[in-house]
Image (spheres, helix red, strand yellow):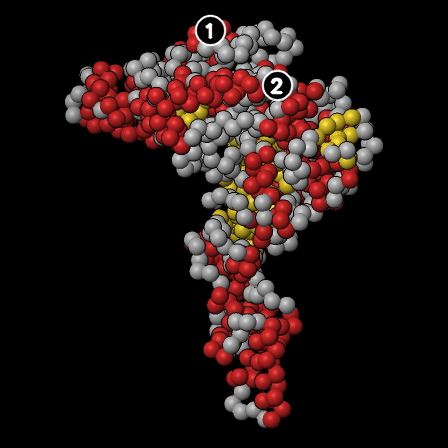
Amino acid sequence: MIYVDRSRYPAPAELLDFQQKSLATLREFFATGIDDRRLRWPSFNFPPRVGSAVRDTLYGVFNGSCAYCGAPANTIDHFRPRRNAVRAGHKVDTDCYWWLSAEWNNLYLCCAACNVAKANFFPIDGPVAEPETFGDALLDERPVLLDPCHDRPEEHLKFLADGTVAGLTARGTATIEILQLNARDRLASRRKIGFLIREELRVLQAQGRDSMDPLRYLAARLDAETAVRNRPEVAAAIQALVEEISGQQASPPPPPPPPAAHADADADPIPGLAEMAWLDRIEISNFRSISTLDLAFQSIVEGGEGFEDTAGNGQPWIMLLGENGVGKTSVLQAVALACMPDDQLNELGPAHRWLNRNADVHDGFIRLSFSDGTQRLLTFSRDSIQFSSEGVASPVRLLGYGSTRLLPERNSTPPAAPARCSVRNLFDQRHPLANAEAYFCTEASTRSDNFELIASSVEKLLPDQGDAKLTRSDDGMWRNQLPLDALSGGYKSMIALAMDIMFHLSGSSFDMESARGMILLDEIELHLHPRWKIRVVSQLRALFPNVRFIVSTHDPLCVQGLGKGELIVLATNPYSGTFIHEEIDVPPGAGTDKVLMGPWFGMTSTLDPDTLRQMDRHSELLKAASLDVMEQKELDSLMRTLCARMNTFHAHSVPHFAIEGGGFGAGLWKDVPQPLNDGSEKIIHHRLLGFLDKSTGSKEGGHA
């Protein structure tokens, strides 16, 4: 982040026209009571013509770079969020800052990663601005987040030679945490640039220019190269390297204590700084059936031409696919164990029960890396009943759900308060979900304004009923004079899970767009109708955009909605028993049959067993050198039956079933899609070998 003077760039004319019209609409809307707003929230979207003009101008202001981290960017961000600003102590100001939704000086160029991380967080150390406050008067709020167009970032941030950023002030530390400036991909970018600059300086020294002032040289070079002069990560790398070469760099000072809060003496001045990170990487060794596993969440990449401040699809997911017993649940439980506080670790039995059963295995470990640079290491061995841990417990709010998610009793006691780590259901299928509905219906635990936020999130899961609103009473939540308990079993199951998640995340924020956390969910398809299965990923991602999910599934419908690199197929080598995992994307437009018969599920057919038996017999008769009268009649009968059952089974398809070796498996494996990448080849190979073992009893692979 570097200071940017935007005074030379006036607002585009298209934006000024749109701003006047939108302000009039928004004034009228926000004059209504909060109860009238939820179902008819106005659109803040820029029309394409306005969005293009704004973005093109912002490209000039920020030289095509993210205002916050310096990465290439194409998203329009609102420095002050358009609504639901999250404050200190998890308070949410629902009306802030609608009047700035089209204000030129509130619009910044931003990358998708910073846009998602920043979300609606806008902690302040002063009084909240009154509606329609503009210009310098907004500075009285004393924002915690650094403003690159007003603040001097070098007074608050220090870029070190190893690529990390250290906070020199409380505001600098808060900005690093909120934007996750030390995340893995940001560090890699700064280290790469630092390496290139360091190598160039070494070349200069080798040429006898070691007496040259590196600061003067680099400043002159950057003046000559305007294309990179304003790239913040370049400036950051140069700052660190110049100090390193000049011998000026010292260890960063510890961040000072955060400033005192004025608005609420009991609230933290910076909301949930201990919960701003995400799980980034998982390394597992010798945990149950898992010999070696190394998984990392995909980096958030730029979307298309979107003009909104919700670019991309939210946080990345990991979905695990594989047969029963291959290790899907073990991955989830390993993450949960490593995230547990030390005093809870040994409540689930002796540590050695989690060790891989192979005779030559003596110890194992689970290592988790988080986006704030912290790590958690959990080790266990055959000789110890207790875990050993290094690093503090998870900085992220973690929830875990097993494949049996019992609904809470309607009259059960509402929970007292959200726990930061709630994973018991993942290990104990008898442990029910929390009675979150009762918690949200109690004014003492959920104020009316916070209930409105929760209700707006729950309504996204309910069937559309026009202007029907979700309300609450002492008896629970109601919609159209009907309690939520009157919904079908599938709806109740999905809503109970969603509300359990909302309850625990409310410790971070009642605004689910900003709430951060980590969800471990076994068998995501549980109790869902096919229409829900095919959109469950997209729906949960939209409902909890700042939450990272690791889920498992057996259902081909649930893989729809995943992005690149989010689907991991787990398998076991049928000969060696070696655990393998590969990243295999499902191509857009792939139907259920293609997914089932591809490398993801490895099925040889989606037909019923009786039809497959008749196809086998048909293939056998076709290969016979000669047929007697009865066999010919049988062949004709089979042809008629199969043609009736399958419109595609015609005479010209006969060779498909008549290849050497016979049997439906050999023929239908020809229909498996071509490998999509190097990883899918391995999975296809092992799935095919495993099938042939079962169907022929041979380990030679036969004609395949």
Task: Return the residue at label 1.
Answer: 137
Q: Position of residue 300 (x, y in %)?
A: 46, 35
Residue marked by disc 2: 32
Q: Is residue 116 left or right of residue 454?
A: left
Q: Amino acid at mark 2?
A: Thr
Count neighbours of disc 1 (C-alpha within 10 A) and say few if under 14, some if 14 to 19, many if 20 or more: few
The answer to whether any part of residue 351 appears in the image is no
Q: Quadrant of residue 434?
A: top right
Measuring from the top left, give residue 159's x and y in whole percent.
39, 19
The answer to whether mark 2 and mark 1 are in CB contact below 8 A is no
Of 268 and 384, which appears nearest the observer?
268
N-terminal of the two: label 2 or label 1?
A: 2
Q: Depth check: give the residue in front, 231 or 29.
A: 29
Quarter of the image holding residue 465? top right
Q: Position of residue 645 (x, y in %)?
A: 60, 72
350 horizontally vs 47: left or right: right
* Residue at the spot 24% in from the left edge and 17% down from the top edge: 219
Q: Is residue 144 above or below residue 591?
A: above
Q: State the image coordinates of residue 239 (x, y, percent, origin top left).
A: 33, 18
Mark 1 element type:
helix
